[in-house]
Image (cartoon, rainbow, N blue to C red):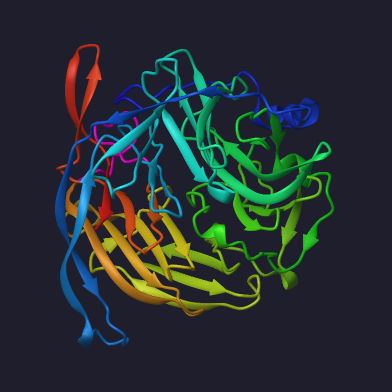
Amino acid sequence: MQPGIRLKTKLGIGTATLATLLAGVLAPASSQVPGLPTQVVDLEVPTRIARYKVTDFGRSPSARDDRTSRAKFRVVKNTGNCCENYLTSSTRGRIFDQGGKWINYTDDDGATWKSVQPLVPLVNGEGTISMGPKGDVLGVQWDPYSGDHLQAYKYDAASEEWTYLESPLHTPFYDRPWLSIVPGPFAVQGGEAPYVGFLDGYPHTGTLLYTTDGLTYTQASSPYVDSQLEDPVESWIPTKKVPEMDLMQPNTNSPIIPLGGGRALAPPDAFGNDWSLLNPETLRWAPFTLPGGEKLTGRYLVDGQGRLHNLIATGSTFEYRISTDGAKSWRSTKVTLPEGVAITGGLQLDFRANARAGVAAVSMHSRNGTKGTDLDLLYKIDISGNTPRLDRLYEIGLGDVDASSSGPPADIRFDFNTVAILPDGRIAVSFLDSTTDEAIHLAQGVVNRLGPAMAIEL
């Protein structure tokens, strides 16, 4: 969004009540509504080559075989909005960014860009995007400035066509949406849907909209409401091997964690209910616990081999864990950040795991207490085996900006982290430093302000 004009809206209806109403009165869509054609145009954005410090930790636990060097990245500006990027990548290495009003993508590691745009003019917005099965892509953006447009985008890989559709159903303020695709198949009104897309927008209470066709978000889902009605489930986490899950993982700030086989986890939400598990036959959420009362903690995702990954980050350390038996047992590595650096937590953290590439990536917008500035760290972890091994640390950017007051109405904005792993194991990541300024067009003229940009490993 544009600086200094994030909206503040008081909802006229309680969110819990809204969740109940939505879950109770909305009927499933009877058929897919045809989408409108988009226009795919060339996009000119500033790019440059930069080299950032990288530490290779070698094969031994000792620091004696650690080596430092410089890694080459392409820095790309203006593909998101003022405050965030939202990245994902395809099996062919196409990089997508839906951090703003349009879906932008590159097929040549950021050298040139295309933009997927609707027919209606947009002013500015916030977006979310995810890969789907068999090459499909779903995205959603909300633009309050051009008349409250919430628009769904879909790339149908079979027809190689982009379409979009207005989505009028949403809460009055739908800032910072999150999208998670859960692979099926699912039985839907006598037919079959290959996946379901769950959408969540501010105020992020777990009141979800979902789509079975990729464009129409007219069906509602609420783990809170369902948990009052469904029988509890106690089991280990039921994951399934789905190779495409390597690239279908949502931003880990999302409230939905796809597990494969039509199942998903939802973490505790604003209403106070605990973890929930999606039933693929009913698309309803049941209260979920591990056997013996073991607690779920941290962030989770599932890779293409069906392995469960868990990131637990606190203070100046994080623990990375892998389970091959649904959280019954774990193999882990503990990582200490550079001296004086601490994790800021919240939305400033994201991670992915690509089993085929053998790489996990942990990205964080951390705080350098020694210098009084922020520092973007990117850790690569070797997951070619079932025991994670710390591989490399990249210090992305110059680490020379104090963005500790980031958020409305601050002039410097970095609202959340995002990272994507390319099929060959290289990384695309968002970051912020003194070079990532952007020209913002306002009524009083053009102003330059600092916001995040993208760095693509070359």
Q: Is residue 307 above or below residue 153?
A: below
Residue at the spot 77% in from the left edge and 47% down from the top edge: 227
Q: Is residue 39 left or right of residue 139?
A: left
Say which of 11 and 238 sits in front.
Answer: 238
Verify whether residue 410 appears in magenta.
yes
Report which quarter residue 446 is drawn in. Answer: top left
Q: Is residue 138 left or right of residue 87?
A: right
Residue 208 visible in the picture:
no
Q: Residue furthest front?
A: 159
Q: Position of residue 286 (x, y in %)?
A: 77, 51
Quadrant location of the N terminus in the rendered image: top left
Q: Position of residue 294 (x, y in %)?
A: 67, 70
Report which quarter residue 381 is drawn in. Answer: bottom left
> What span is colored magenta in the figure?
402-415
Q: Position of residue 233 (x, y in %)?
A: 79, 60
Q: Is residue 443 above or below residue 406?
A: above
Verify whether residue 196 appears in magenta.
no
Is most of the magenta stretch helix, strand or loop?
loop
